Structures are given as C-alpha cells and as structure tokens.
Amino acid sequence: MVKYSDKYFVFDKNLGTPQLPEETAYAKANSIGRPVVELTEEQRYSFDLRGWLLVENVLSDDEIAAAKEHITRLHREPDSLSEHQRSSMAGVCEDLIDHPVVVGFMNEFVYHPFTDGSKTPPLGNQSCYGFRMEMSFSQYREAGDGKFGPHNGNGMMRVPGDHHTYHAFPGQAHTCLTRALWELNPVEEGQGGTLFVSGSHKAAFTGPQSLRTIDSPFWDSYSCPAGSVLFFTEAVTHSSSVWAMDTPRIAIFNSYNSIGSKWHNWDPHPELLAQMPPMRQTMFRPVYVGGNVIDEASA
C-alpha cells in the first residue's frame, strides 16, 4: 500500500520539485491517543471513483446509544443543555470529530503538507492536524420529513475559491469541502438516505435534466447499520430525500476543509472549544496556509 510519504507532491513554492514529506507530517494517533485508521487501497480507489465512501460498523453499541441520546435531546429538549452543549459536536459526539477513521480519511484526501518553500515545517505533525473543521450540524427526521433537492457536481471544473472542488492527478487526489456523515440509526437504500450521482465530482458536462427527478437511474444510495460513517466530497452531485423508515433518521453531518480554506461563517462555541484536548483544538486554528502549524514543543 502506498504510504503518505511515497506520494508525489508538487504544489509548493519549489519550482515543481517533488515534495516527499516524512511520515511524521501525518498524525498517527488522534487527540485522545487512539491510533489513526488509514484507508485501504479499495476504500481510497472507491472514494476517488465515486466521490463518496461508506465505512460500516465504526461505532460500538455504547457509542451509538450515547450519541443518539445527545442528538435526540438536542432536538427535543435543547433547553435542558447548557448553551455550549447545544451542538452536534458536544458531549459524547465531540469524539466523533477526530475519530481515528475520520483522521485517516482526512490525512489522505483533505490534508496537503505545504512547507512554504521549505521555510516552515509541514502543516501537520503528531500534535497538530493538517486539516480544519468547517462546521457541524445534526438531523432528526421522522417519516415524511425531508425533500429531494439535487445540487453540486463538476468539482474538477470549478474555479479556485469555490471550495466545492476535487482535483486529481496520478497517485494523488484532493477534495476541499468534505463531509463525514454519521448514521446513528440503520438506513435502508431508497428509504431516505443521502443520494449521490457517483463520479459527478469529475464530470465535464452539465447534468442532464433527468437528474432533477429522483427516479433517474443515475442516483445511487446505500444501506448501512447504525454507527456507520459516510464520507463525501461536496464536489459530487448529491441530494437529501424524504425519510420513509419507521425509526427516525438520527445523523450528524461534520464538515472539513483544507487549512487555508473556509466556506461557512461558523465557529464553535468558545467554551466548547476551550475544553477540548489541545490537539483537537488545532482543527479550529486561524485560516491561512504559510507556517500555519502548531509545533509539537508548544502543543
């Protein structure tokens, strides 16, 4: 399997000289010491091919129950939570934002270890993530909730600054604005999960009018058990749909971006941020590129 340091990085201030960062530029453990789970070759290929990737059975039964309890309370009894806890990344859900599976994915597809032409170290290390958290929201849907609303796509053709982008060349791919969707209840295909037009993140043509109907054969979806996480680039054409299952859809949508990019006018509650482990806080540092890394000595 290709390791991060074997990749051919050229986009730096170095006249196109290959940049081969050391393995230490990529976090090997998350903020609470859990080992990062790297993508398999199959997972990496699947995401690049389709623009989305489902990883099943990531959470334990206890983790699922605790996260569901928090999100249900957040939607039904928000006043029972303190102000800084009224968030889909608060309480037990906080550990999901840098879950080992999430960090492994972001290291592969979102993080790019710029060095500012060798003037500064790479943007990540063993105490600092090389990607940032963009925003978070949750969803609690009963049967009949939701609607069909297709959007995005053509990510390789979008101009800089759009953020809904996807770039690829042999041996390397990069997605800017990216979601990690946690499904906390089971999902059956065709019953209200998120829909995708697989491969549309690389599409060169305008989507046909048939995409504006939910019965188009281009739409793909998924079935999964509770506790699964689904990654997708915002560059892929996707849509919500009407929830049709007997149990509610309880889901968390966490969004990530490269360290120098910000799309949403959103920041976590200061009190929530202050209580996070130091490494987790690095996902919310100021948005810029050159030298934007917290060195391990000061972390």
Image: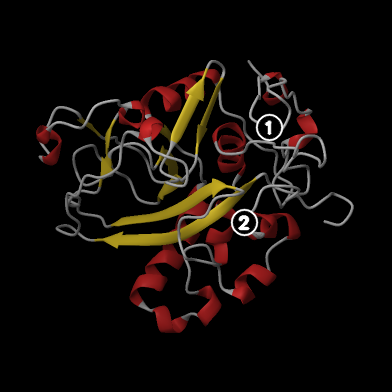
Front in this rendered view, residue 121 or 22 = 121
Give me the C-alpha separation between circle 1 and circle 2.
18 Å
Q: Which x, y percent locates residue 85?
A: 53, 74
Residue that carries the numbered disc 2 in the rendered image: 287
Q: Which x, y percent locates residue 184?
A: 40, 51
Amino acid found under the numbered disc labelled 1: Asp
Taking the spot 47% from the left edge, 47% from the top edge, the residue there is 161
Front in this rendered view, residue 267 or 96 = 267
Amino acid found under the numbered disc labelled 2: Val
In which image quadrant can residue 187 be found? top left
Q: Give the quadrant of the N terminus.
A: top right
Residue furthest right as drawn:
297
User: Is any atom of residue 227 visible in this view?
Assistant: no
- The answer to whether mark 1 and mark 2 are in CB contact below 8 A is no
Considering only order in the chain, which callout, 2 or 1, is on the residue closer to the N terminus? 1
Front in this rendered view, residue 215 or 71 = 215
Residue that carries the numbered disc 1 in the rendered image: 12
Q: Does 79 sit left or right of 297 as displayed?
A: left
Taking the spot 47% from the left edge, 53% from the top edge, the residue there is 254
